[in-house]
Amino acid sequence: MLLAYAFRHQPQLQAAILGAFAGALLVSAAGFLALADGSLLARLGRSIETDVGDELRTTAGVYGVISAIAFERFDVDHVVLAPKAATRSR
């Protein structure tokens, strides 16, 4: 009851609630559109690829990292130059 009275007689409260709702709606719509057209995932992928390259460059024993080598139908994200070959244990 008190909340209804405050809401009815406080135009600033009405404006704040309406503004918060409208802002949340706009942010949600923008996020949905970015996800739907694929631009959000592409930006996220580029950001992660950059972070991985930066992390590889700071790894001990690595001489250098070459990033984003483009070929005709695909690209290689990172080539790591190191004195020893990487091995995978099973």
Image: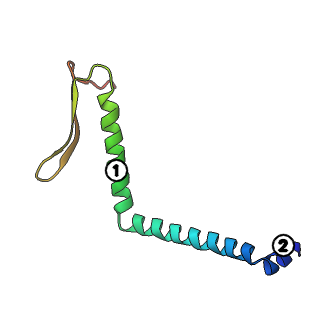
* Kind of residue at disc 2: Leu
Q: Is residue 44 left or right of residue 67?
A: right
Q: Residue at x 35, y 68 (%)?
A: 37
Across and down, in percent, residue 11 comes to 74, 78
Q: Secondary structure at mark 2?
A: helix
Q: Quadrant of residue 89?
A: top left
Q: Is residue 46 left or right of residue 79?
A: right
Q: Residue at x 32, y 42 (%)?
A: 50
Which label is found at residue 45? 1
Q: Residue at x 73, y 74 (%)?
A: 12
Q: Secondary structure at mark 1?
A: helix
- As drawn, 71 above or below 56: below
Across and down, in percent, residue 77 comes to 24, 42
Q: Quadrant of the N terminus?
A: bottom right
Q: Residues within 10 Å of mark 2 (few under 14, many from 20)?
A: few
Color style of the picture:
rainbow
Query: Which comes sooner in the sequence, label 2 or label 1?
Result: 2
Q: Which residue is mark 2?
A: 3
Q: Quadrant of residue 14?
A: bottom right
Across and down, in percent, residue 52 comes to 34, 38
- As drawn, 35 above or below 48: below
> Between residues 15 and 29, which one lies in front from this camera angle?
15
Q: Is residue 3 left or right of residue 28?
A: right
Mark 2–mark 1 Cα distance, whole angstroms, equals 46 Å
Which label is found at residue 79? none
> Between residues 53 and 14, which one lies in front from this camera angle?
14
